[in-house]
Amino acid sequence: MPIELVRRQAAQFGVASLTSSLLNSLTDYVLVLNPQRQVVFATCNVAELTRGKTLDELIGRRPGEILDCAHAAEAAGGCGTAEFCSQCGLLKAVLAALEGRRDRQECRVLRVAENRVDALDLLVVTSPLEVGSERFCLFSARDVSDQKRRRVYERVFFHDLINTAGSLEGLMAMLEREAPVSLRRDLELAKLGFHDLLDQIRAQKDLVAAETAELEVNVGPLRTLELVRHAADLSRQHPSGADLPQVRLAPECADAAFESDQTLLVRVLSNLIKNAVEASSPGETVTLGCRERDGRVEFWVHNPGVMPPQVQLQIFKRSYSTKGAGRGLGTYSVRLLSENYLRGRVSFTSAPEQGTTFTLSLPSDPTGRFRSTDSSS
């Protein structure tokens, strides 16, 4: 479209208009594009994304051109017409809006400018916008390059760290078998320490994946009593377990069949047990139990302590902890994994007469099958 007509369209979004004021109040980068995908409006902060280009320099140009996309000039038709453009999330989102549909896409832009190459990751949301008899595309973008880069580094870091810790755990196990009797206890403690380290690394890896909706759930058949025994055994394997409160199973535990992700469920129960142990004194007892109720299975962890009211009000919040700065992901991860991935509900009660009990309620089986028999531990 001739630049004179584009500037006429741009005048509708002048700096004094209400639309301009509203769009400039947003933190995302906002453009308005005409049916030819040319810029007719840009918020002030777009200069940060386009290496300082002014609004006058942006008017009439297409998104790939203002972003210095490496493919913007590869075809005679300009931005959006090269072979690479067929896979461009930004182009797909813009075309959807011009067809009258709201869309959301991730876009990876390879930028080349001043003999420098860099990568830009954008989360793009577009909506149709009508002004008078003309249709435009309202384009909003958020730079997620740092998030994407961090996730790549995190994946590599966790992968290498798990491999290293796993190798050391295996080495400790081999040394324990071959060492003199006098050294085996020390090597056993070292092996348990590496096992605990490896479990914490995997837990942190899963938590990061859970927060970014990348965590995979593997559902399989389980039994409640076997699961709580396993969780209790893991808590007793801590290298300093002799100095910790006792963890025991409630005598009224019910053995029931259900379906869930064993790894995530054990992680949730282990977190609850760990928190209960840390809130108890040596000589006290932490009780772990399971039961069937109203077609669901329930697990609970009890300790004799009581949480202050101010702690109860913030217990599931991210980064909140009674243990000092830099802690506080335990109960937050319990709720995140339980409710977002295990389809469960987590709750607690805490009172001077009863102590503190955390309860996790899960559906027994997505298909509705359920079997249970009472069993004492």
Image (cartoon, rainbow, N blue to C red):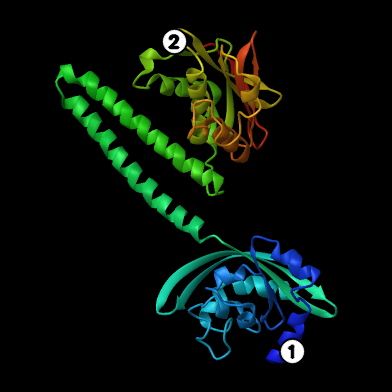
Observer-nearest residue: 204 or 321? Answer: 321
- Which residue is located at x 57 percent, y 82 percent? 79
Observer-nearest residue: 54 or 316? Answer: 54
The kind of secondary structure element at disc 2 is: loop
Q: From the viewer's perspective, is residue 186 above or below residue 152?
A: above
- Which residue is located at x 68 percent, y 33 percent? 368
In the picture, the quarter occupied by the N terminus is: bottom right
Q: Which residue is mark 1?
A: 5
> Whole-Å distance between the Cαs marked 1 and 2?
80 Å
Q: From the viewer's perspective, is residue 339 above or below residue 359?
A: below
Tell which tag, 1 or 2, sits nearer the viewer.
1
The kind of secondary structure element at disc 1 is: helix
Q: Position of residue 336 (x, y in %)?
A: 59, 38
* Quarter holding residue 118: bottom left
- Point out the residue furthest to the front here: 16
Nearer-N-terminus badge (1/2): 1
The reply, left or right, for residue 236 in relation to residue 375 is left
* Quarter holding residue 30: bottom right
Q: At label 2, which amino acid type do we have?
A: Pro
Q: At label 1, which amino acid type do we have?
A: Leu
Q: Position of residue 321 (x, y in %)?
A: 54, 29
Q: From the viewer's perspective, is residue 274 above or below residue 106?
A: above
Are circles 1 and 2 on residues that touch, CB within 8 Å?
Answer: no
Q: Residues within 10 Å of mark 1 (few under 14, many from 20)?
A: few
- Which residue is located at x 16 percent, y 26 percent? 178
Q: Position of residue 231 (x, y in %)?
A: 47, 24
Q: Which residue is mark 2?
A: 282
Is residue 293 visible to us here?
yes
Q: From the viewer's perspective, is residue 87 above or below residue 26?
A: below
Observer-nearest residue: 277 or 7? Answer: 7
